[in-house]
Image (tube, helix red, strand yellow):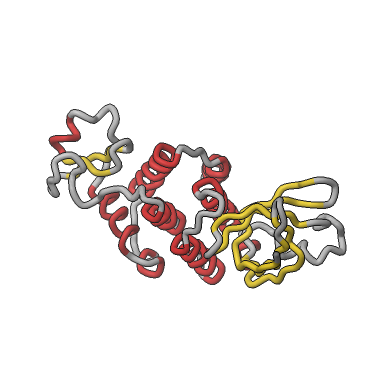
């Protein structure tokens, strides 16, 4: 059987002497593992189309085992991102998120479109700290783990929301938070406002926000812990990004 897909290349890994296994996320088909035969040979026509975070059109031959990529065409290479180390690291982290948080052959068209929008934005605009935080929160919501940010997760009160429960998945009011200080995270009013904006507004709006360093750190820490707890995953590249960020301070 022959068919084609249009998808994002999440990663590739060596397979046999000249081949690679390519993990692709497609809008309609979900995440697929495919074999790019002979791709490590210098003259292979597939070398460019299976690079990480390429958006490619791939023609596939499907038999009993994994699909075989027979030919392909790059739809977008995101060259501007590849020329910027910070953007590249952020996008490779995004690919890791998509790979570890999606199941094989389980389509999430909305999540796919969100990923494309981040790539297109970063390729044409300057990066800013909330781009990936926006995607993390939107991904959690798309996968059914979106945090409750408008009212206390326990009593339903909408006032004095001062802590966040990772395990319960939402904000806690002052009263409910008193009994949860060992488990709940401190949540400033600014951090809560930023999280609500991330959940409701688009990237162009976020660019105009002026956010304190403390709030940025709280948002990043909260989402990192929330992702690890509810998706039961650790993300290796996050530690590398932190190390490089600290090294440049």
Q: Nearer the viewer, residue 161 or 150?
A: 150
Q: Nearer the viewer, residue 45 or 213?
A: 45
Q: Along the horizontal axis of the image, is 239 left or right of 207?
A: right
Where is 26 relative to 214, above or below? below
- Residue 120 appears in view: yes
Instruction: Choose top left, top right, bottom left or bottom right for residue 83.
Output: bottom right
Residue at the spot x=17%, y=41% of the render? Answer: 173
- Residue 79 percent across, percent down from the top left: 65, 67
- Residue 231 percent across, percent down from the top left: 44, 41
Q: Along the horizontal axis of the image, is 60 left or right of 202?
A: right
Q: Nearer the viewer, residue 156 or 30?
A: 30
Quadrant where the image shows the N terminus? bottom right
- Residue 133 appears in view: no
Residue at the spot x=77%, y=62% of the render? Answer: 47
Q: Along the horizontal axis of the image, is 154 left or right of 52?
A: left
Instruction: Choose top left, top right, bottom left or bottom right for residue 228.
Output: top left
- Residue 162 percent across, percent down from the top left: 21, 41
Residue at the spot x=50%, y=68% of the render? Answer: 121
Where is 78 relative to 31, above or below? below
Residue at the spot x=83%, y=63% of the render? Answer: 44
């Amino acid at each position: 059987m022959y068919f084609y897909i249009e998808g994002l290349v999440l990663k590739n890994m060596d397979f046999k002497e000249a081949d690679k296994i390519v993990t692709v996320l497609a809008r309609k088909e979900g995440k697929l593992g495919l074999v790019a035969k002979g791709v490590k040979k210098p003259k292979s026509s597939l070398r460019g189309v299976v690079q990480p975070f390429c958006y490619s059109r791939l023609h596939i031959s499907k038999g009993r085992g994994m699909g075989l990529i027979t030919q392909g065409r790059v739809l977008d290479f995101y060259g501007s991102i590849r020329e910027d180390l910070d953007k590249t690291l952020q996008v490779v982290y995004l690919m890791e998120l998509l790979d570890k948080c999606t199941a094989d052959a389980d389509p999430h068209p909305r999540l796919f479109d969100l990923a494309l929008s981040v790539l297109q934005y970063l390729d044409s605009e300057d990066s800013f700290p909330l781009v990936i935080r926006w995607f993390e929160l939107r991904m959690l919501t798309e996968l059914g783990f979106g945090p409750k940010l408008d009212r206390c997760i326990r009593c339903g009160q909408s006032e004095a929301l001062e802590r966040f429960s990772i395990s319960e998945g939402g904000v806690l009011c002052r009263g409910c938070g008193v009994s949860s200080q060992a488990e709940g995270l401190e949540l400033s009013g600014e951090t809560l406002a930023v999280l609500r904006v991330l959940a409701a507004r688009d990237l162009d709006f976020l660019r105009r926000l002026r956010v304190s360093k403390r709030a940025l750190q709280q948002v990043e820490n909260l989402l990192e812990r929330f992702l690890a707890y509810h998706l039961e995953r650790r993300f290796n590249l996050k530690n590398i990004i932190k190390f490089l960020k600290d090294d440049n301070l």
